[in-house]
Each structure stands twice: as C-alpha cells, then as structure tokens.
Image (cartoon, rainbow, N blue to C red):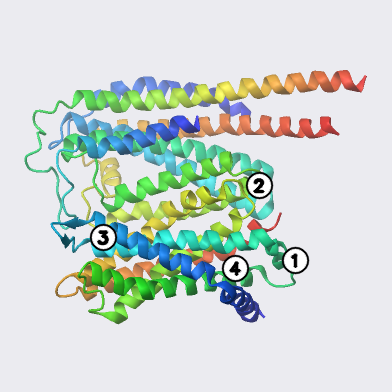
C-alpha cells in the first residue's frame, strides 16, 4: 500500500513538468490563465470525469486495502487462538 | 461509535450517489465553465484532509504525552486518511488548473505548502513502516509538526497573492455569491467529511485488532 | 541549572570535536563540494547563473546540516552516551538545547566559509547588506537546526535512520529554506530590497519560535522509552 501511494504521488510529481506547456510565471501578479495556452480548445469534460473517477478509485482502493489487512489480522487471531486453546489443554 | 457505522455508511453512500446529480444541476461559473465543477470535490477533499489531520495531530499528542495506545490507533488512522484525501486534492487541483491556469502546477505558496503537508504525513507513514520498533513515537512527533503547518497552509493564500483562489470564496459561496451552488457544495463537503470519518473508524478498528493480535502473541509466547 | 547543563553539553561536544575536528571538516568540505557541483551544473556559456546563488547557498546549508546532524548523533549512538546523558539528573530540554547549540556552531562555521565562496563563484553581492544577511542566516539556520536536532535525536535508536532523517526533516524545514532563499534573493536584487528581506526575517523568526517550542515540548516524551 505504501509503495502504491508513493508511486501515485511520484508519478503525479513527475507528470507535471513533463506536460506543462510553459514554465510557471512569476508570482508578482495574478495570472488567471497563461497567455498562449490552449485553454479554449482543451475539453473540460474529461478533466472533471477524471477528477471524480480518481476520488472514487482512491476511496475504494483504500477500503479494499483495509479489508485485505483486516482479513489477514482476523485470520492470524483465529489461528493464534486455536493454538493457544490447544496448548492450554 | 460502532452503532454509528451503519447509518454513516448509508448516509455517505446516498450522498455520493446523489452528488453527481446536484453537481450537474449547479450553475456554470462565468469564466471557467464546466471545469469549475471540480471545485465540488477539490475543496471537500481538503476539508476531509484537515479533519483527518486534526484527528492525527490530537491522537499523536495524546499518545506522546499520555502514552495511550488507543490514541496511537487514531493517529495512524488520521495519517493514512489524510494522505488519501490529500492525494485526491493534489490530483483534482492540477486537473482543474490545467484548464483554468494553463499549467498543471505552479510553485505558489498554497500549492507548495499543501504538497509539503502531504509529504509530512507520507513521511509519518514511512517512519512507521521502516523505522523499526519505537517508531510510533517518531511518527507522532512528525504528525505534530504536520498539524502545526496545517493552519499556515490554510491562511497562506490570504496572506500572499497567489494564483490560487482565496479562502473567502467558500463563505461567499455559502452566502449566495453563485446561486444554486451552495447546496451541492454543502452536500459534497458533508459527504467527504463523513467519508473521512467513516474511513478513520474502519482504520481504527483495524489498528485495534492488530493491537489485540500483538497482545495475544505476547501472551502466547509466555 | 538549565543553562549550565546546556553549556556543559556544548563544552563536552566541543572537547570531543577538538580532538579530531571530524564533524566540522567533513561538513565544511561536503558543503564546499556541493557548491562546486552546483557551480558546474548551473553555468551557462561560462557565466554562472546569477539568480542561482541564493538557492545554492541554502541548499548547501540544508544538505551539509543534515549530514552534520547525522554524524553528531551517530557519535552518541556509537558510544551509547545518549543513554548516559538521559540518565543524568539534568533537565531533558537542557540536553536538547546543548545539542542544538553544538549544531548551530558547526553550521555557523560552515556558513562563514560558504557565503564568501558562493558570492565569489556566482558573482553574487551577498555582502551588500551584511547585517541583514547575517540575520537571515542565523534565523534560517536556527529553524533548520532545531527541528533537525529533535529528529536526529529521536532517530538515534531507529532503523534506517540515515535515510529517514531527510525524509522526516525536509518537508518540515523546506518552508524555512524557502523563506531563506526568498530573503537572500531580495538582498541580491539591485538595489537590495531591504523591506522584503526584513519581512522574510520576520517570518523566519516566527518559524523559529514555533519550531523551538514544539521541539522543546516534544523532546521529553520522545526520549523516554
């Protein structure tokens, strides 16, 4: 799970400079949209869908990892209780 | 706490299924159009992360100063959920920014400090995993520092002029600056914060079961 | 009692250091070689990138500081003197302050050598406003060092401590480094932007206050086991 999170964060950080159209402008003034960037042609729908999809995938993924770890712990607990039960006899 | 689990689950499910409808019905923002609708998951993601950070920082403090094992369970749950929702915020933000600002990322105060805050909590989890025995205390100390940066990250966008919108956007929205968007935002916000609470409850349960397992191992070895 | 203990710890470290000068020389040489690497990397047509000086100075401080922290506490771990220190009837925060002063001394000496070097290699007017520059360096290094001392002390008994120190330290101290770089850049502008530099010094002082308080507060429970 740790590796997965790290890979996600790492790929996010790596993707940004690779795809940026131009270097970030100086922060001395408000820059709503960089001039020359193709903001009009870029369709917004895939971005919105991607954002929402990521939220779902991340949340479900986390639930799944918790479920996996929980079943493992419960299995270990049951196995240990059985062993302890046998030993005490 | 356990009794709240089922009703919380139902509430969150309902909210998340209903959210797309309300968000689609919300009005388009004048300059940004459709892509502004990412706002309805972006801001709530960070609100959920802040909730998780609060739980993590409080749990860490109690664990450090009172040596309370249950508090450590809350600390690790808070850290994991904070990383999760921070990741959602860090992904939805650039997706929005790519269209609204033309670039995926800007090194302005808000984005930089938010990324650092996420990295602090990732570091918390790394220390727990690779630090060997006794690393819970180290993670707790790191979480305290992470919790200290959180208000700074929030206020940074008001203090410095950045490309990121200010914190006044949300209160103004709720008061009606963009009619029709207050309700979807409130629902999304409640949904995300409840989801964070739910996930933390589940994670705390896992942590408690692991502690029970460890205790049983110790008893068994004796 | 508090100050006496802190100064005693500092004297002890200084005495050990004076035998071999190990930490000081290695830290200084590492910082110098880092600056040299940067000066090779950030050269364009034989001319150094002038704006790079501020960032390079602070990066060199951050990297060499991390190493110095690791080495200082490795010494404690090796001789198991940390446990002896903790067993002493001395207030724990005083031990922390003593260690912090030692690190500040090492980094201060390194910076005394680094700043002229960076000014030379990058044609940067770092000494245009020496008082403000010194204030920036002192507050910035103090912020970095106090968090670093806390984390290095608590990692002494951890596994993978060498790689965990940067992982834990950098996200927390990067705002300090950024503030230092911004302040230094303001001073390197022509004419030097004193108002901005003073503002960044103020922010660094705020960081220092918060970090020192948090570190002093957390040192005691972290060292108990």
Q: Residue at x 55, y 58 (%)?
A: C152
Residue A69, visible in the rendered structure: yes
Classify the position of the N terminus of chain B by image quarter.
top right
Q: Quadrant of residue C79?
A: bottom right
Chain containing mark 4: C
Which residue carries the number 1 mark? C87
Q: CA distance from mark 3 to mark 4?
A: 36 Å
Contact? badges 1 and 2 (CB < 8 Å): no
Mark 1: secondary structure: helix
Contact? badges 1 and 4 (CB < 8 Å): no
Q: CA distance from mark 3 to mark 1?
A: 47 Å
Locate residue B2 relative to residue B79 in the image: left or right.
right
Classify the position of the C terminus of chain B by image quarter.
top right
Mark 2 crowd level (few <14, some 14–19, many ≥20, 10 Å Cα): some
Locate residue C156 relative to residue C135 in the image: left or right.
right
Contact? badges 3 and 1 (CB < 8 Å): no
Callouts 3 and 4 on one subunit? yes
Q: Position of residue A49 (x, y in %)?
A: 27, 23
Contact? badges 3 and 2 (CB < 8 Å): no
Which residue carries the number 2 mark? B134
Mark 3 crowd level (few <14, some 14–19, many ≥20, 10 Å Cα): many
Callouts 4 and 2 on one subunit? no
Contact? badges 3 and 4 (CB < 8 Å): no
Mark 4: secondary structure: helix
Q: Residue at x 14, y 73 (%)?
A: C190
Which residue carries the number 4 mark? C96
Q: CA distance from mark 1 to mark 2?
A: 19 Å
Q: Position of residue A87 (x, y in %)?
A: 89, 21
Q: CA distance from mark 3 to mark 2?
A: 42 Å
Locate residue B165 relative to residue A62 in the image: left or right.
left
Q: Earlier in the sequence, mark 3 or mark 1?
A: 3
């Amino acid at each position: 799970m740790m590796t997965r999170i790290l890979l996600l964060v790492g790929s996010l950080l790596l993707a940004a400079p690779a795809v940026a159209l131009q270097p970030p402008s100086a922060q001395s003034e408000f820059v709503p949209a960089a001039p020359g960037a193709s903001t009009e042609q870029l369709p917004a729908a895939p971005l919105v869908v991607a954002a929402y999809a990521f939220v779902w995938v991340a949340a479900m993924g986390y639930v799944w990892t918790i479920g996996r770890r929980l079943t493992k712990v419960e299995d270990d607990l049951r196995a240990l209780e059985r062993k302890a039960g046998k030993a005490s006899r | 706490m356990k009794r709240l689990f089922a009703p919380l689950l139902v509430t969150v499910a309902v909210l998340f299924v209903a959210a797309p409808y309300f968000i689609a019905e919300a009005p388009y923002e004048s300059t940004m159009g459709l892509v502004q609708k990412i706002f309805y998951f972006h801001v709530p993601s960070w609100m959920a992360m802040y909730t998780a950070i609060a739980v993590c920082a409080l749990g860490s403090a109690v664990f450090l100063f009172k040596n309370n094992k249950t508090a450590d369970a809350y600390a690790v749950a808070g850290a994991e959920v904070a990383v999760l929702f921070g990741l959602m915020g860090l992904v939805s933000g650039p997706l929005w920014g790519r269209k609204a600002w033309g670039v995926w990322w800007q090194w302005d105060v808000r984005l930089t400090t938010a990324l650092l805050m996420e990295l602090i909590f990732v570091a918390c989890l790394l220390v727990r995993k690779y630090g060997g025995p006794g690393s819970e205390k180290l993670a707790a100390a790191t979480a305290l520092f992470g919790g200290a940066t959180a208000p700074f990250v929030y206020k940074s966008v008001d203090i410095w002029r950045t490309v990121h919108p200010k914190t006044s956007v949300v209160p103004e929205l709720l008061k009606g600056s963009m009619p029709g968007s207050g309700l979807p935002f409130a629902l999304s916000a409640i949904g995300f914060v409840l989801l964070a609470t739910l996930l933390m409850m589940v994670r705390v349960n896992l942590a408690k079961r692991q502690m029970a397992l460890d205790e049983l191992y110790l008893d068994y070895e004796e | 009692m508090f100050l006496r203990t802190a100064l005693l710890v500092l004297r002890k470290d200084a005495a050990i250091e004076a035998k071999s000068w190990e930490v000081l020389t290695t830290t200084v040489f590492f910082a110098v070689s880092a600056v040299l690497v940067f000066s090779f990397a950030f050269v364009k047509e034989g001319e150094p990138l002038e704006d790079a000086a501020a960032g390079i100075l602070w990066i060199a401080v951050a990297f060499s500081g991390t190493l110095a922290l690791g080495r200082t506490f490795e010494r404690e771990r090796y001789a198991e003197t940390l446990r002896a220190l903790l067993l002493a009837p001395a207030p724990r925060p005083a031990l922390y302050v003593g260690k912090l002063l030692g690190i500040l001394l090492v980094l201060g000496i390194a910076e005394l050598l680094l700043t002229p070097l960076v000014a030379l290699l990058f044609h940067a007017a770092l000494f245009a406003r020496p008082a403000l520059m010194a204030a920036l360096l002192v507050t910035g290094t103090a912020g970095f060092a106090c968090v670093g001392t806390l984390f290095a002390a608590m990692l002494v008994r951890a596994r993978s401590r060498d790689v965990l120190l940067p992982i834990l330290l950098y996200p927390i101290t990067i705002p300090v480094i950024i503030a230092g770089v911004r302040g230094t850049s303001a001073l390197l502008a022509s004419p030097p932007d004193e108002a901005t530099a003073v503002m960044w010094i103020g922010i660094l002082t705020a960081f220092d206050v918060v970090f020192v308080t948090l570190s002093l507060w957390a040192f005691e429970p972290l060292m108990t086991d």
